[in-house]
Image: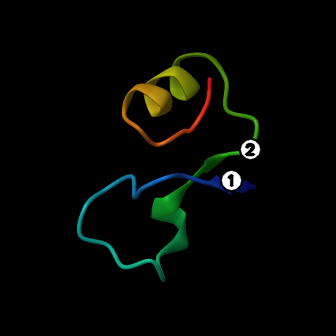
Amino acid sequence: MLIPTLKTLFQGFPPSNFWYFGLPYNATGELKEDAYNEGLWGEK
């Protein structure tokens, strides 16, 4: 299950490719920290 990100994971893909606009619901640790640092996640 994915939760929406603040921006796309990869540039150049349309919003219809929803899998590029989401991260795993239970993301933790390094994945969540990297997403936050890249501006994909709104909060730590």
Q: Is residue 25 left or right of residue 9?
A: right
- Residue closest to the eye, 24 or 39: 39
Residue 27: % across, % down: 67, 32
Determine whether 2 is above or below 30 in the image: below
Residue 22: % across, % down: 57, 55
Q: Is residue 32 left or right of residue 26?
A: left
- Element carrying mark 1: strand
Q: Which quadrant of the figure contains the N terminus? A: bottom right
Residue 21: % across, % down: 50, 61
Q: How is the image coloured?
A: rainbow
Q: Say which mark, if any, is on residue 3.
A: 1
- Element carrying mark 2: loop
Determine whether 10 is above or below 33 in the image: below
Q: Say which mark, if any, is on residue 25.
A: 2
Cα separation, mark 2 vs mark 1, equals 5 Å
In percent of the image, x 23 and y 70: which residue is there? 12
Q: Please name the amino acid that badge 2 sits on.
A: Tyr
Q: Which quadrant of the figure contains the C terminus? A: top right
Q: Please name the amino acid that badge 1 sits on.
A: Ile
* Sooner in the amino-acid sequence: mark 2 or mark 1: 1
Q: Residue furthest left?
A: 12
Q: Do the residues under discs 2 and 1 have CB atoms within 8 angstroms?
A: yes
In percent of the image, x 49 and y 29: which residue is there? 36
- Residue closest to the eye, 26 or 38: 38
In percent of the image, x 67 and y 23: which residue is there? 28
